[in-house]
Each structure stands twice: as C-alpha cells, then as structure tokens.
Amino acid sequence: MKAFKDLGLDENIIKAVEDMGFETPSEVQEKTIPILLERETDMVSLAQTGTGKTAAFGFPMLQKIDVSSRTTQGLILSPTRELCLQITNELVNYGKYYKGLNVVAIYGGASISEQAGKIKRGAQIIVATPGRMKDMIGRRMIDISKIEYCVLDEADEMLNMGFYEDITEILSYSPKDKSTWLFSATMPKEVATIAKKFMHTPVEITIGSKNIGAENVSHEYYLVNARDRYMALKRLADANPSIFSVIFCRTKRDTQKVAERLIEDGYNAAAIHGDLSQNQRDLVMRSFRTRQIQMLVATDVAARGIDVDDITHVINYQLPDEIETYTHRSGRTGRAGKTGVSMVIVSKSELRKIKAIEKKIQKQFDHKEIPSGMEICEIQLHHLADSIKNTEINHEIDSYLPTINEIFSDLSKEELIKKMFSVEFTRFYNYYKKGKELNVPTADPEDDHKDSVRFFMNVGSKDDFNWMRLKDFLKDLLQLDKDDIFKVDVMGSFSFFNTESKHQQLVLDTFHDFSLDGRRISVEISKDTGRKRGGRNRRSDSGGYSRKNSGKKRDKDRPKFKGKDRRRSGKPENRGTGGKRRNRK
Ligand code: ADP
Ligand code: MG
C-alpha cells in the first residue's frame, strides 16, 4: 500500500492531508492521482460511492492549476446543489495551503448575481450544477474558454437526472484540448456513450466490479382503468408498508391534486413542483430526506434536484410524454448499489408505450397485478408482526405495566395476540372487503395460471433475497423449473410465491422442519391465492419488492394511512384510522 507522499503530491497537499487526518490513499486515489499528475489525459474512473473520488480528481487539479492566475482553469460538473457545495468545501480544505486559491460553487436556487460577482473576482476552479452553469454561460457571466481540466463527477447521476443536453451545451463552450475526467459509481450504457462523445482514448480505471447500475431497478406495470389510477396507487402503497417513493405525474396540477388526496387519506405525502417557492421546495426536500414524507409526488422538472438514496419505489402515476423521461424517473431508485422498483400504472390505451419503453431501455417490464384487498391485509399483518418483534422496549412504560397487565390478566397470550392483530386486521379488512377488482384482464393466454397455490415464507430482503434469488433458491431446492415458481414477491422479512397446486405437497414437505444457516424457515399456504382476479402475469414470475414496508387503512374508499419507516425516522408513526390517531409500531 502506498502513502500519499508516494503519489507525487506536493507539500501543500500533503500538509492538508495530514490536517484532515487521512492516513493512506484509497484505492481509487492511489490509482488515479499519479496518472493525472503525470500526464495530460482524459480519464474514466469508476468506483463506488464513498471511496474518495473527490480527492482523486481534486488533488491533481489543485496541484496542476496556476493559483497566481485568476483565469478559470478547472470546471467540475456535479448533479446536485448539495454535492456541488460538498465538493467546493472539500476542495477548499484540500487547497488551503495554496495562497490565492479561489473555488466558487455555482448552483440553482441562490442569487445568480452574487455568484456572478464571485466569478468576476477570479475563480480558478468552478464547481457547478449543469442547469445553472448553462444559464450563466448563456448570460456571459462565466467564461470557460480557457479551462484545462473538466471533471464530470457522478456522471451516471447527471445523466439519470436528465442533464445530457445541458452538459453537451456547456462543453461546447470549452476548449477542445482540455483534459476531461469522468468519475462515476456505475457505468450504464449512457455513461459509456458520453465517455465516447466527450473524450479521446481515456485511461480507464475501475475499482471493484464494473457496475452497470440500472440492473438494480426492476420495472413493473399495472394495468387498470384510467379512472382507477388513484385507487391503484393507494393499494400499491398499502402493499408496501415502508415504501419510500417518488410518484411522478405529468402536470403540476395533477401533482398537487394527487398529493392532496394522499394527505387527506392519511399518508405521509407531499408535492414538489415548479409553483412552489425555493423555500417551500427546500422544506419539502428536507422532510423527504428525513423521511417525514414517505411519498413525494413530483413533476419531472422538480424531480431533477432529488438526490436521495434509498428510494424504494418510483411510481409512474402517469407515463411521461417522452420515453427518455422514463429513464430519468426510474433512475431515482436503485442508487448506490441498492435495488429499486419502478412501477407504472397504465390504462389499456397506453400499453404500446410500455413496449416502446422496453425497447428503449432494453429491459422487460413485468406485468403485475394490483394486490387484492386480502393480500394487502395479509402483508400488513406480517409487517405488523415483524415490527412488533423488532421494536425496542421503551422502559418508560414500566410504571404503567401493572395496570395494563391487570386489564389483560384474563387473556392468554394467544387471545392477546388475536385481539391485538384483529385491531389492525379489521381496519384493513373493513376498508378492503368491498374493494373492487382493479386489474383489467388481458387477452394474453400466458397470463393464466389457473390452478395455483400461494405460499408465505418467513425470509425476505433482510435475508439478502430478492425475487430473482428467492426464485432460484426455490427452484433448486424443490427441483422445479423456473416457470413452476411464479408471482414471487419479496418483502422485508417475508415473501410470497406461487406454484401450481400439484406442487403444493412437495413444497410443504420440503419445508417441513427446514433450516437454512441454522435458522428455521417456515413456509405456509397464504390465504390469498392472488388468483381469483383478472389477468395473470405475462411472464410467470413477477418482479419482487425489495424492501420492508408500512401502511394503513380506514373506512370507505378513503383508507387513512400514515406510514413511516420508524427504523429510519425514529419518530412515532401516527396513522389515521377513521379519526382516531394512534402511535404505532
Ligand atoms: P465519493 O466521491 O467517492 O463518493 P468522497 O470523495 O465524497 O467519496 O469521500 C468520502 C469521504 O471520505 C469524505 O468525507 C472524504 O473526506 C473521506 N476521504 C476521502 N479520502 C480519504 C482517505 N484517503 N482517507 C480517509 N478519508 C478519506
Ligand atoms: Mg463524489
């Protein structure tokens, strides 16, 4: 392992590194820094988030620019305002021993004239988001005609967010003979394309395995009548109790409307769109980031600034007009090595758009069904059981326990459990017992798995399963074909799958007294077969949910819902239940 001083870095940087307490260079630093210091070259460097890429391009850039000149020599483009500020901050720290160094951050939502003023005073390095940068170049507030180094940081993200055109335009104002350094966590096709377009024989450095990124996202569509869109959305949320999602609508009006209905129905939702002030948007984003908001309803334009990891689901409430936009939407999930699901609610007339998108993204959608009411009840019950089991005991309740125990003294544990779960179950049950069938039947003959059994299984994504892995696991264990196992849905700590009825006994026998890595695995027949509804999955399997979830219901067609993943927010979760408010989980 090398030390920083072996990389060719000068005294100013070495001192700053010591001040920051960095002991040894990270792998990406060790590999990129010497090359970038030694020669003028383009570079593509791929390494996971958090591996120190900022210093990997920051140290060489700082060392190579001339701080005695006030000309802008380096440009760093980054996808979001937060990152932009973060990089600026790091560079200022790394470069604190370079006298006269001036690094300026350029980003939207702040005073443009103030930023222009800072540039005017002379900035050797500009760190910018593409939108504002393009704007300021257009207004001749920034001159990048003399830059020698250009960094495209988090290139995959910038493309996900739809900045391709902006980047192209910005770079058209920069000199041809500069060096371009692209840094990215993943290498989807789009990044390879810009590497080709903007670079000449770049040196390629890959740390770890080349992650093509978009593989983390599975795509699903749900076929419903256009008038049932909203109800379908609610069911998708209820079937995914700890959903943390962005919901895309086409217009500001719809965005606002859907958010309002969700809020009215008790969900933790909010809208983000261009009619909000920057202040309001900041507020919404802060609540989303801290997970006070579980469902963020957004327009495409407003969603550009969303840089939140861990989004479990992107829901296309309506499909975008442009196919291209779908890619940006689905790219909000499956970030930083996590898996995600992009769901589309479509009506029959839009089905051909799904085909067009499949062609564009080179991936197949799974045709999935809106869960039935009973399925949702079951998911919610398991989720509740799971949350109770994982709840840390709050000893503040100790002093109340004698009276509470007194109240329940006549009940056995079994009765207590039954009653407790009935509270939850009845609420959902009452809401959903008259819930109508939302799925529109399709004519696809493959859609029919007439005679099947649905199983519940007590392992889920927490056990490192996703639907593909679980399906493979079952297939191997049961020695069945992969088409014999379908409708695999993986939730947080449990899962569901179907087989044809003729395999029922095989499944039950196989899992009788079955352990995996010392843990008892139980498989039971699920109440809901998922079968009595309209069409069946086009392909026999179905994409899985990959995260644990939380949800609610009340009466009529307006179940009250307030769900929040407490593990993350740490706040008590209120859910409205027909007027009553309770803390839960
Ligand atoms: P990336 O851009 O790859 O996601 P960052 O450049 O943001 O990663 O670095 C992540 C964190 O690691 C930052 O807080 C940074 O200060 C710190 N860091 C970077 N390099 C080192 C190092 N060699 N030793 C210790 N910490 C480092
Ligand atoms: Mg970074």
Image (cartoon, rainbow, N blue to C red):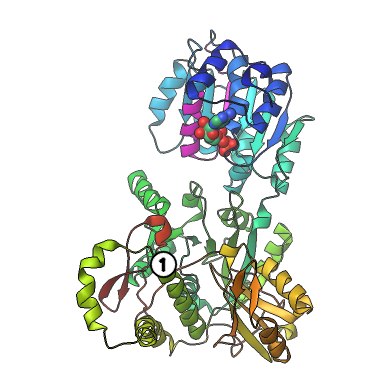
Q: Is residue 136 in view?
A: yes
Comparing 149 with 274, the one in front is: 149
Q: Is residue 138 in view?
A: no
Ligand 2 lies under 8 Å from the Cβ of mark 1 = no
The reply, left or right, for residue 410 in relation to residue 496 is left
Residue 460, compared with residue 55, is above or below; it is below
Residue 102 location (% of width, % of height) = 48, 17
Report if residue 147 lies within the magenta region: no
The residue under label 1 is which amino acid type?
Val
Please tell me how crowded label 1 is: few (under 14), some (14-19), or many (20+) other residues with Cα within 10 Å: many
The magenta region covers 70-92
Location of residue 543 by image quarter: bottom right
The reply, left or right, for residue 69 in relation to residue 481 is left
**Mark 1 falls on what kind of element?**
helix
- Quadrant in the picture for the N terminus: top right
Residue 442 location (% of width, % of height) = 66, 83
The reply, left or right, for residue 379 in relation to residue 483 is left
Residue placed furthest toward the top = 68
Instruction: Name the residue at 67% across, 79% down.
Output: 537
Residue labelled with disc 1: 258
Residue 568 location (% of width, % of height) = 42, 56
Instruction: Name the residue at 52% across, 82% down.
Output: 375
